[in-house]
Image (cartoon, grey):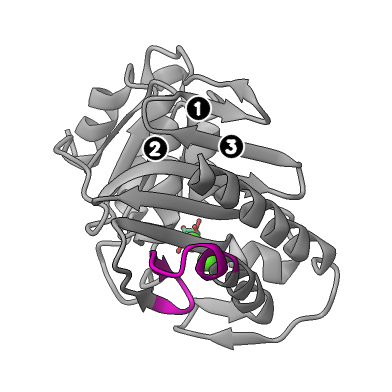
Amino acid sequence: MEVEKLAESLARRAGKLLKDNFAGVRSVEFKGAVDIVTEMDKKAEELIVGGILEKFPDHGILAEEGGEVIGSAPFRWIIDPLDGTTNYSHGYPVFCVSIGVEKNGEIICGVVFDPMQDEFFSASLGGGAFLNGKKISVSSTESLDTALLATGFPYDIRTNKDNNIDCFARFALKSQALRRAGAAALDLANTAAGRFDGFWELRLKPWDVAAGVLIVREAGGSVTGLSGAEFEIGDGNIVASNGLIHLEMTSVIEGF
Ligand code: IPD
Ligand code: CA
Ligand code: CA
């Protein structure tokens, strides 16, 4: 399908751009107390958005750094040109490009590309999930006790008490181990690949999750809101897991 091919080629091109410039000195602007943007976030986004509009000028776009383009076609591209920008700006090599494509409001295609590991995660609705072309599936870990989990913290951590620290402490005591790698789209992709057994986070943006949610589901996993109710892309509170530990995860989040 045209859309999938273009999503792959743009994610790969943007990822190469990020990798090629990884060692360079870059300017950083602060969007909030700890929320930053580098010139490479913007350059990667320009490359992706330019490539979409050249091929599909009537498609809609929601991209982190550039806001929204309303299209006349039923397609909308949801783009995080650099997920893990704090890692990138510190020279910690954990980041990715994430592109999800919606048709009539439903995600039909998702790609997450980690250029440092040369790992390309992809899924299409009903077509399964893949890592570098090989089918992937979620883990078979049956209990939280032996689960490796991933999470992150919202950018308003210093000012909003609902900042995941309580939950983090509870999971630290109940799981085998926790990781805060710093790139939500990659956390989701790694959950789909069975490396993490579960992931949760608060107040993520549509571009953090659009691709990863489809990749987890197509890999056989479950994705819901924090209480186990249906996940809403606009809400951004998310629990993603192998399905087997999902109820245990939502119970811990709810404080039981
Ligand atoms: C952030 C990363 C991080 C998560 C934050 C996100 P950015 O995205 O995904 O892991 O904890 O909530 O905003 O700013 O690096 O694109
Ligand atoms: Ca992000
Ligand atoms: Ca970003």
The magenta-colored residue range is 51-67
For the residues labelled 1 and 2, the Cα–Cα distance comes to: 8 Å
**SS assignment at label 2:** helix
In x, y percent, where is residue 246? Answer: 29, 26
**SS assignment at label 1:** strand
Between 75 and 123, the one nearer to me in the picture:
75
Q: Amino acid at mark 2?
A: Leu
Quadrant containing the C terminus in the rendered view: top left
For the residues labelled 2 and 3, the Cα–Cα distance comes to: 11 Å
Which residue was labeled with disc 3? Answer: 121
Q: Label 2 near label 1: C-beta < 8 Å?
A: yes
Q: Is residue 181 visible?
A: no
Residue 53 shown in magenta: yes
Q: Label 3 near label 2: C-beta < 8 Å?
A: no
Mark number displayed over residue 129: 1
Residue 105 shown in magenta: no
Between 248 and 127, the one nearer to me in the picture:
127
